[in-house]
Amino acid sequence: MSGHGQSYRAAALAAIGGFLFGYDIGVMGSAMAMDNFKSYFDKPDAFMRGFIVAMLTLGCFLGSLIAAPMTDRLSRKRSIMIAAFVFTVGGALQCAAWARWVLILGRVIAGLGIGVLSMAVPLFQSEIAPKQLRGRLISFQQLSITIGIAVSFWIDYGFLHLGDTTASWRVPLGLQIAPALLLGFGITSMPESPRWLVDNDRDDEAIAVLAKLRANGDKTDAAVLAEYQEIKDAVMFDRRTALRSYRELFRPVLRRRTWLGIGIQAMQQLTGINVIMYYAPYIFLQAGLGSVSSTLLAQGINGVVNMGMTIPAILYVDRWGRRPTLLSGSLIMGLAYLVIGAVMGATGTPVTLDDGTAAMNISSEAAKYTCIVFVYVFVGGFAYSWGPVGWIYPAEIYPLRVRSKATSFTTASNWLFNFVIAQVAPIVMQAITWKFYLIFMAFNWLSLLVVWYFYPETKGRSLEEMDKVFGAPSA
Ligand code: BGC
């Protein structure tokens, strides 16, 4: 397996895109809670705070749609490079923001970069990966997302202690520029996707890349030539038979896969993960954890659980398979929400806090900690399953001719649902407190049924074999 070091390196470097994704998601929540931030930006109200958070996801949504023509025309690698530099501009504007509009513009621009990266990175990873390691290499992106989130939680927490200075939020916002530059420059020294090369009639380069990735540069290696041939056959088949337009995605051969990809990304968001990632301090408050410092600490631990529990996915997802991973994840997450909702409902009494927040007053310590522990059970349940597989599955099921278009749709679906949940969750949570968790219990168990009935296993199959898995004629 000596040749695979190259694939690992390329996948890991590209995964810095995931770090930026996670960091920018995580950094804003606590930054906005800082006194200096509030006074500097003229005390943004609840609507404005939601707007500042949401503008990133909106940028991401647009970015993931631009990503299709970009990754096809400019190549996977160059798109990652450009997106990293766009992100840098967005990060710099957020860091230097002297008015609300600059901050918001910075969020949208950074979002455009992240939107492209969130589609291009798993695409690139899936196309350079040997099939038996594909799930693992795409999981690198998810691990980086979780590292980004955790690091941003702790950095915010640390800089909070700087006190009343703009540095307390400018530095956390500015720090993200460093990894973006590392990605932008670093990716230039990585190989291009061999599949993109073949699709652009650059076969010699494709063979050279495959040889480098798989066989220490030996272009005569039998496995390298076999893989090249498999890709070439698929490309030639596509050219003879298939269209490459967006419409192709909704023709009978691909329609099912298009909906499966859009569906898995929507269901990933409907697990309710970002209810926890964006609003956990608020949930801990609802669970009766009183002080701000203890809720922030609980949030920090949350980030660590999320990160730690992604590691089993990296190690085992190619062995367990996608289906068992998703099914068990849904079961655990649904169960966790059931426990949280039931314990809060049974032991809490509704109260209104000083700032108008509706919360549950849970007097029993045991009940309180049960809720908090089950938030962690939920996050752990997500981190090894729907977190990574939500990104792996769409990156592997489409034929090359439409892969970028399809994954740009599926990624846009993720960001759209992310946006909606970020907007709606606080309002609904406020209105129905503990029953809120039962809604997400239902979503999780519904996803379990949907995966059980509709999603075929894809582990260990080459990208070119997917037509067979989904019963398409080329098989
Ligand atoms: C999701 C994000 C989420 C993160 C949490 C990702 O897979 O797409 O929306 O915030 O996981 O780790």
Image: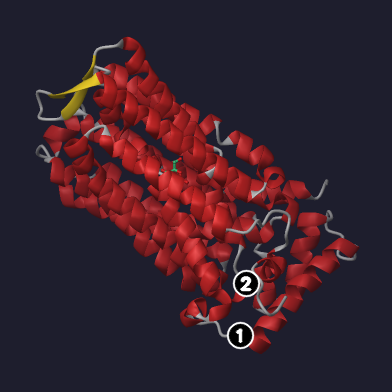
Query: From what the image shows, is residue 158 above or below residue 228?
Result: above
Instruction: Tell me which amino acid carries mark 1.
Output: Ala
Q: Is residue 34 left or right of residue 128?
A: left
Query: From what the image shows, is residue 83 above or below residue 475?
Result: above
The quarter holding residue 466 reads bottom right
Q: Please tell me the numbered disc located at residue 399.
A: 2
- Report helix, strand or loop for mark 2: loop
Choose between 281 and 107: the one closer to the eye: 281
Q: Is residue 57 left or right of residue 219?
A: left
Does residue 318 appear anywhere in the picture? yes
Q: Position of residue 300 (x, y in %)?
A: 39, 25
Label whose residue precedes the other's in the sequence (2 or 1): 1
Q: Residue at x 50, y 39 (%)?
A: 331
* Circle 1 residue: 242
Q: In the rendered structure, are the residues bearing label 2 and label 1 in contact, judged by CB atoms less than 8 Å apart?
A: yes
Q: Position of residue 56 (x, y in %)?
A: 31, 52
Q: Position of residue 188 (x, y in %)?
A: 59, 57
Query: From what the image shows, is residue 240 above or below residue 280?
Result: below
Q: Residue at x 67, y 48 (%)?
A: 321
Q: Residue at x 20, y 49 (%)?
A: 51
The quarter holding residue 437 reads top left
